[in-house]
Image (tube, helix red, strand yellow):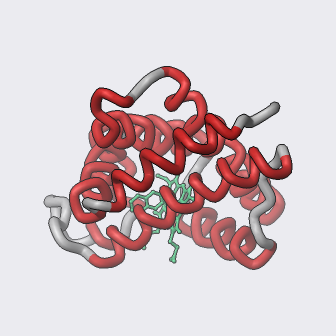
Amino acid sequence: MVFSEKQEALVKDSWEVMKQNIPEFSLRFFTLILEIAPAAKNLFSFLKDTDEIPQNNPKLKTHAVKVFKMTCESAIQLREKGEVVVSETTLKYLGSVHLQKGVIDPHFEVVKEALLRTVREAAGEKWNEEMKGAWGEAYDQLATAIKAEMKAHS
Ligand code: HEM
Ligand code: ISQ
């Protein structure tokens, strides 16, 4: 798939906006994941002893930011090389974390939906189908790499 400079810019620019308010958007992202799939609650260590989503959990924030940053990196790579290459070390690590936590393929669609909704809310009037497509494609490629790594070790 050809990924244009325009698509890369759409992803980068919306991420720049979200960066202005990391606490809000990371929390929103996580809240949406649990709204779409309440059962996923049990996978996350930060929810172990509580029914409420922690409002200011550093781990939640850092992990959420990593998902956005990595998706943004994917968009850059798609434009530059036409494919997403995740470093071997990162892929091995993320593959084993997600496998060990019990993440399964359908969960990736849940996280995708939550990610797209978060970007939509952040982008406001700037949101459009092209932006959705660009984020969606960048995420899918990243998810495919992680899922393949998980399969290789399951
Ligand atoms: C942990 C990224 C998809 C559930 C993490 C971490 C990162 C990450 C960076 C932190 C690893 C660490 O330092 O310990 C991603 C990316 C994804 C993705 C880039 C997709 C492209 C998913 C999906 C689920 C999921 C689909 C399932 C709902 C988890 C869980 C943890 C985790 C349960 C461990 C959190 C904890 O308890 O500490 N993920 N993730 N992730 N992820 Fe994901
Ligand atoms: C880990 N993996 C995927 C998505 C996440 C969102 C919030 C916190 C941690 C996450």
Q: Residue at x 74, y 36 (%)?
A: 3
**Side (left or right) of 81 relative to 27:** right
What is the quadrant of residue 25 in the picture? bottom left
What is the quadrant of residue 22 in the picture? bottom left
Q: Picture coordinates of residue 109 (x, y %)? A: 53, 37
Q: Nearer the viewer, residue 37 or 59?
A: 59
**Side (left or right) of 92 relative to 66:** right
In the picture shown, does residue 131 fall above or below 51?
above
Q: Residue at x 77, y 52 (%)?
A: 84
Quarter the N terminus occupies: top right
What is the quadrant of residue 2 in the picture? top right
Q: Picture coordinates of residue 129 (x, y %)? A: 50, 21
Q: Residue at x 24, y 74 (%)?
A: 57
Q: Is residue 154 visible?
A: no
**Side (left or right) of 132 relative to 140:** left
**Side (left or right) of 6 relative to 86:** left
Q: Picture coordinates of residue 67 (x, y %)? A: 50, 59
Quarter the C terminus occupies: bottom right
In the picture shown, does residue 140 fall above or below 21?
above
Q: Is residue 59 visible?
A: yes
Q: Nearer the viewer, residue 137 or 10?
A: 10
Q: Picture coordinates of residue 70 (x, y %)? A: 59, 60
